[in-house]
Each structure stands twice: as structure tokens, then as C-alpha cells.
Image: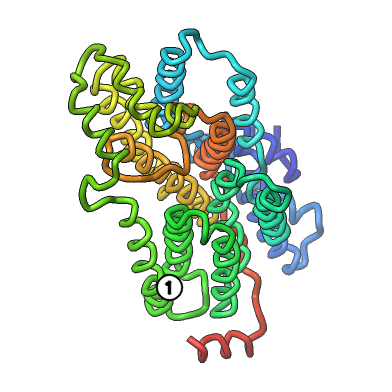
Amino acid sequence: MELNTADAYLNEVLLHVRWKRAHNTIRKELSDHISDARRGFLENGMEEGEAERLAVLEMGNAAEIGARFDAAYRPPKNYGVWIPFALIIAIGLFFRSIRAGILEATVFTFLLPVVFAAAYFVPFPRLVKFAWPLYGVYLLSLAATFLGPLVGESFPIYIYYPPMFFPALYALLIYKQRGRGAIGILLLGAALLAQMLFYFFLSGVLVAILVCICVAQLVFAVLSGWFTCKKWLTALILLVPMVPYCAKCIVAAFPASDSMYLLALVKDILSKTPWFGMTDISLFSQIEHVYSGTWRSVTDFFLVFVALRLGRIIFVIVGGLFAAFFAFALRSCFKQKSMLYRLASLGITLHLFMQFIGYFLTNLGLAAFFAYPLPFVSDGNAAMLCNAALMGLLFSILYNGALVDDSSAKKYPRWRLKLVKEEM
């Protein structure tokens, strides 16, 4: 059957493309080509119907074109990310069942896949237009956590969780400001500074981690040519004040000696723990004594607790699984076609990495990070839900990245561009 209309031709092409999510992208690409060709024929004096027929014929055989698109648009498997992640979930359930004596089956356990799925189907690119309103809501959520002391309550533990989403939000803000110069970079700097002020007197390490991740995102965007300023000079200006500050805060978490009693105690316990098999579980009571018997002892030193049951080999297993996950995740991040998706996935992956490395080093007695549990392994229901949302968004980005192209940056008045260049 001869295909005389664009819609019929496009439908025929898409019959040969198996990845359904790619259909809208392919339809738009082919429609643009057909429209350009039809416009050319109309300019030569042809009638509308004849112009469309010739434009469709010019595209070629629908089956052949469909086969080419089917080969080009294949859903990424991402097995290198999925398999370590699934094993981390499984080993986390196993470890927590050892602690509890039964297989974990809480409300939060059943909520995890729901939160993961909800985040997976979030239309992330559409959030760009709401970037600044979302940032306002984010600041309000931070401010709400500080209302406790005003009514005589201490800071809730939930104060640490909103910043887990900030790298993804910051990617939206950076994308929103692309095409600008010094003004855009100053706005992004002010956005980072505003949320830093909430945590400045609470956790210098937490602030340093966020600064490291967000400045890395901003420098990456600058070097990619997103802003109308000198790339290397701007990147240097951003890094010079931030690197010493972040280094100072993070180094403070690494004691120069065994002067910190708790970390020295962890090292001593691990030195008495064999690589395989159970040892004297009562050793953990020394850590509980430091915490006055609170539940935080097991949460902050969950790997030490499990090592006393199974042996130090669990550090090798957990470290290897997380290393594989982050290696493949970072590789997938840099393969994203969209810079928005690349920045967002990079920010999420780096924050998950900082959670892991801080917790892992603390449980080895090498550092003093106490902000977050180990993702999907140790206790911490609220943190698990937050990380489930981040993982759902990350996997959505890695899966749909091949279908997303960056839209054109907003064009600012010419005089403003000149002014920005002179300022830089």
C-alpha cells in the first residue's frame, strides 16, 4: 500500500521499532524532516497534498527506516548497575534479619518499592520549569526542621535527609540558568550558600560533602560551555575558595591519631575479629556503652555488629558490591546524551558514594562520619525511603537517557551578554 500521508508513513515506521518509549522521539524527528521537505516543495509552487506525498516518498521505505531506528534505539540494559544494586538489597535484608532474628518485614520494607517506582516515573525534564519554586519548597523544608528547638525539642534526625535530594535539584537549577554569564553563576552560588547556612553550625562535614558535589556539578557545566563566560577562568574562580574549605572540613573527620576513643575502640574490636566465623558478640557492648545503650550504636556501627557474627569478610563483600555499583553507575552517567541527565545522575551517584564511603570508613575506625546509615544495608527507615527515591530517579535517568536531548537555552539580550563578558 502506498503511503501518501505523513501520519500513515510514521505509523508504518514505528511498527518496526520495538522500544515503545522511543516512539515519540522518533515520530518527532521524522515529522521535522517531513515538514522541512514539504515546505521546500510548497515554496516551489506545489499543492499541499502533492507536497506532502513527495516529502514522504523522499524519506525512503518505511520498513527499512523503521529497522534502522530499531537498531539505533534500544533500551539500555544497565546490568552492571542493576545486579550489584539487587545484591546490595539482598545482603541488607540478610544482615538486618541477623540482627533482628527474623526476616525483616516492616511497613517501610513494603514502602521501598512503592517509593522507588514513584520516583522512577517522575518526568524529570518537565521539572526544569519549576526549578526555582521547588528550591523554595526545599528551603521551607529545611526551615521546618529548625522549629523543634523553638518549642523545646532537640534537632530531629530528619534534618539530615532533605539535602540528599539537593544535588538533583541543583542540576535543575543549573540547567535553568544555562546560557547566562556571571549573573547566572552568582544566582547558583547564592542558592548553594542559602542551604549551606542551615547546616553551618550543625555539621561541617555534611556541608562540605554537599559543596563538593554541587561545585563539581557547576564546574562540569561551566567546562561544558553552558555559560557565556571564560570556561577555565570561571572554573578556577569556583574551585579556589571551595577546595580548601571542603578539604579542611573533611580532613577534620579523619583523626591524626587514635585520640578519638570511639574510633580506637572500633579498631580494637576489629583486630580481635577473625576473617570468618563468629566471635565474642559481647565486644559490641563496649560501643553500646559509649552510646549509653541507645539504638544509634547499632545503626552507626552496623557493619561492626555483623562482622562479629560472620567475620571481617563482610567488609570485603559489602565494599566490593558497592565498588562495582559505583563504577558502572559513573560510567553510565557520563554516557548520558543529555547534559541535564548527566548532571543529575552524577549528583545522585556522588551523594550515594559519599554516604557509603563515610559509613564504611567509620566502621573501619578510620573516620568520624555519623550523618547517614549505609544505603540499603544498615538500619534507618527514613534514609532508606530517601535513597529509594534517589535510586528510582537514577535508574529512570539511566534508562531514558538515550531518548532525551537538551532543549535550546534561552537567549538573553545581546547587551546583557556583553556586560557579563566584561565582568568575567
To which quarter of the image does residue 274 belong? Answer: top left
Residue type at the position of mark 1:
Leu
Residue corresponding to mark 1: 238
Quadrant (top left/top right/bottom left/bottom right) for the N terminus: top right
Front-lying residue, 96 or 305: 305
Q: From the viewer's perspective, is residue 128 above or below residue 107?
A: below
Horizontal placement of 241 versus 409: left or right?
A: left
Q: Report the colour scheme.
A: rainbow
Horizontal placement of 342 versus 131: left or right?
A: left
Can you see residue 55? no
Can you see residue 212? yes
What residue is rendered at 50% in x and 10% in y?
103
Q: Residues within 10 Å of mark 1 (few under 14, many from 20)?
A: some
Horizontal placement of 303 versus 402: left or right?
A: left
Residue 405 in picture, x, y percent from top left: 57, 53
Front-lying residue, 184 or 14: 184
Front-lying residue, 165 or 123: 165
What residue is rendered at 31% in x and 15% in y?
309
Q: From the viewer's perspective, is residue 108 above or below residue 394?
A: above
Residue 321 in picture, x, y percent from top left: 33, 29
Horizontal placement of 5 versus 83: left or right?
A: right
